[in-house]
Image (tube, grey):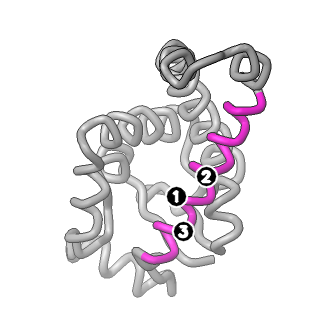
């Protein structure tokens, strides 16, 4: 782990969130957003007559879904330091420089790179599992850490 980060965590009495907690928070957030998308598209789904029509509908709403994920991540991380999944798991995101909730720019950057990481077979998340500071690509670009509350 970066010595500066290690010293910061020790000095402030902070503990990095475990991979398990982060994974469960991710699962909660994904289920919540998927559920919201299904509700928003329920009329369209009920009118679809075949599986192919449902697949086409889902593909047509992919851009809107990505925007929804970015807005969700940006707002909650900026406002509360955590998404609903992270709140449930008692973890939060902090900006390394300030030890506070990330700013709008930082939260937006983190949300964008989170989606990009998902698009590249979740490699950014895999990176975080092997990184000593547990920083995913979106944490590295935004200069954030995920800690226990």
Callouts 2 and 1 close, C-beta under 8 Å:
yes
Q: Is residue 86 left or right of residue 133?
A: right
Q: Secondary structure at mark 3?
A: helix
Q: Quadrant of residue 74?
A: top right
Q: CA distance from mark 2 to mark 3?
A: 9 Å
Q: Which residues are magenta?
A: 20-39
Q: Is residue 31 magenta?
A: yes
**Residues packed near mark 1 inside 10 Å, few (<14), some (14 to 19) or many (20 plus):** some
Q: Is residue 70 above or below residue 121?
A: above
- Viewer-proximal residue among 53 and 20: 53
Q: Which residue is mark 2?
A: 29
Q: Secondary structure at mark 2?
A: helix
| Residue 141: numbered disc | none
- Viewer-proximal residue among 55 and 19: 55
Q: Quadrant of the N terminus?
A: bottom left
Q: Is residue 95 magenta?
A: no
Q: Is residue 43 left or right of residue 7?
A: right
């Amino acid at each position: 782990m970066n010595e500066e980060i290690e010293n910061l965590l020790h000095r402030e009495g902070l503990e990095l969130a475990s991979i398990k907690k982060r994974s469960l928070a991710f699962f909660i957030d994904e289920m919540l957003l998927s559920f919201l998308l299904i509700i928003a598209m329920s009329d369209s789904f009920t009118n679809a007559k075949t599986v192919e029509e449902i697949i086409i509908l889902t593909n047509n709403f992919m851009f809107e879904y990505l925007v929804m994920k970015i807005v969700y991540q940006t707002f909650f991380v900026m406002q509360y330091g955590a998404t609903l999944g992270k709140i449930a798991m008692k973890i939060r995101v902090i900006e390394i420089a300030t030890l506070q909730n990330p700013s709008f720019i930082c939260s937006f950057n983190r949300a964008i790179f989170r989606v990009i990481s998902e698009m590249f077979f979740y490699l950014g998340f895999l990176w975080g599992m092997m990184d000593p500071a547990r920083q995913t690509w979106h944490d590295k670009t935004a200069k954030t850490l995920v800690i226990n509350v």
